[in-house]
Image (cartoon, helix red, strand yellow):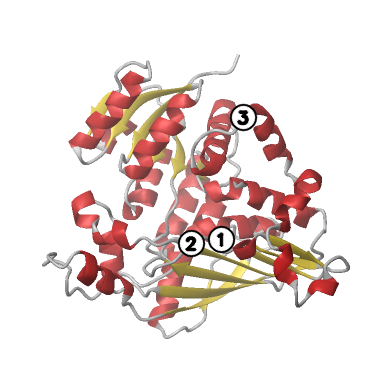
Amino acid sequence: MEMTVNVAVIGLGARGLSLLEMVFMEHPLVKIVAVCDVYGDRCKAAAEVVVKKGQPQPLETTDYKEVLSLPNLDAVLICTSWEDHISMAIEAMEAGIYVGLEVGGAYSVQECWDIVRAYERTKVPVMLLENCCYGRNELMLLNMVEQGVFGEIVHVAGGYLHDLRSEIACGQENRHYRLRNYLHRNCENYPTHELGPLARILDINRGNRLISLTSQASKSKGLQDYIRRHKANDKNFLNADFAQGDVVTTVIKCARGETIVLTLDTTLPRYYSRGLQIHGTRGMYNEENQSIFLDGVNDQDHFTWSKHWGNIEKYRKQYEHPIWKQYLEEGVKQGHGGMDWLVYADFIQAVQNKMPTPIDVYDLATWMSISALSEESIALGGHPVAIPDFTNGKWLGR
């Protein structure tokens, strides 16, 4: 019989509360024993969700240290502001508690080393909860790459391409941490949605690694223009100079020779996309038009390719990933098209079985470090910056 997992949730803003409602309260083997946020009203709202779903009243607290001192706590989910992610995760690991860490970027390379050292010292696993690694398209494409459909992969690209102007501009009212980041930092601040799936495709930390990067940022005008048009009475930020460039482009070189391009575009009007591209010796994929182009199959349509846009659906039957085949049969759950359920179910399963997590501390450190490294490169005018090997050579045989 599978054991029930006692979970505490720290950080109950929009992301934390939605996960509580849509994912954790629907998992039959999860018991929410504590909810924590620096804002008491968020704690109260989260506790009401737990009770409404039929579970006992959880501990409500604004002090995360009180959560980490609870007896019989199996796992903690950290959904706080980005700057608290790693330090809080380390404290939980030192208390012997599995950590599920929501995504974001690191503020320094040192804190990435700190969490790696914490794991190597405590042997307590932490999982970066990168849901995009579990997307239906991402997993199908990974399956195709592993089967050699695209040949040898040479170049990949991805982006966090999401109009967040309203969320950032209303950050003070909504108590959202993105506002202070966009005011004071200029970097690839949210790298893991795009990099996570690409890292799996390129075997990063498992036979390959990231070597170096160079980043450039455009000027920052999108938020200022938005606030002047939509929040003209906002005296605090009407004339604010935001540090964050509207578009940040980061180019990464890999040990095996592949290149990666990451694009952050969150403060200009645009449609949502993760901009996934795969380029190999026998074909390519482009998320922007949901199409697969294969050598020897589509060659005759180089100049009339638009009639084939959206053809990814033709490949579902042959290349659907086994995870999604089973998921579709069982019924897809809520949360970003079903991705949230899959990543959290994997985390809970690791906790139950006292096993390593599928996205581990070395992945976490590598992917999250891109924020700090890109910030350095941008400040140096796009100068190349070395990416540390957080595995200390283990990538050669993992």
Name the outermost residue toward the top. 1
Percent from the top left, x then y, of residue 247? 43, 74
Percent from the top left, x then y, of residue 33? 35, 23
Of residues 227 and 179, the one drawn nearer to the viewer in this rendering = 227
Q: Distance from label 3 to label 1 (Cα)? A: 28 Å
Looking at marks 2 and 3 on the same chain, the residue that comes earlier in the sequence is marked by 2
Of residues 204 and 281, the one drawn nearer to the viewer in this rendering = 281
Looking at marks 3 and 1 on the same chain, the residue that comes earlier in the sequence is marked by 1
Q: Residue at x 23, y 76 (%)?
A: 241
Q: Residue at x 69, y 38 (%)?
A: 323
Which numbered dot is residue 195? 1
Name the residue tied to disc 2.
Answer: 191
**For the residue carrying disc 2, how many other residues have a C-alpha within 10 Å: few (<14), some (14-19), or many (20+)?**
many
Specify the quadrant of the image occupied by residue 244. bottom left
Is label 1 in a helix, a strand or a loop? helix
Q: Is residue 196 left or right of residue 255?
A: left
Name the residue tied to disc 3.
Answer: 331
**For the residue carrying disc 1, how many other residues have a C-alpha within 10 Å: few (<14), some (14-19), or many (20+)?**
many
Q: Distance from label 1 to label 2 (Cα)? A: 6 Å
Which numbered dot is residue 34? none
Query: Decide: marks 1, 2 in contact (CB < 8 A)?
Result: yes
Of residues 166 and 142, the one drawn nearer to the viewer in this rendering = 166
Q: Is residue 255 left or right of residue 392?
A: right
- For the residues carrying marks 2 and 3, which lies nearer the camera in this image? 3
Q: Amino acid at mark 2?
A: Pro
Name the outermost residue toward the right. 296
Q: Residue at x 34, y 23 (%)?
A: 50
Specify the quadrant of the image occupied by residue 57. top left
Q: Is residue 192 left or right of residue 55?
A: right
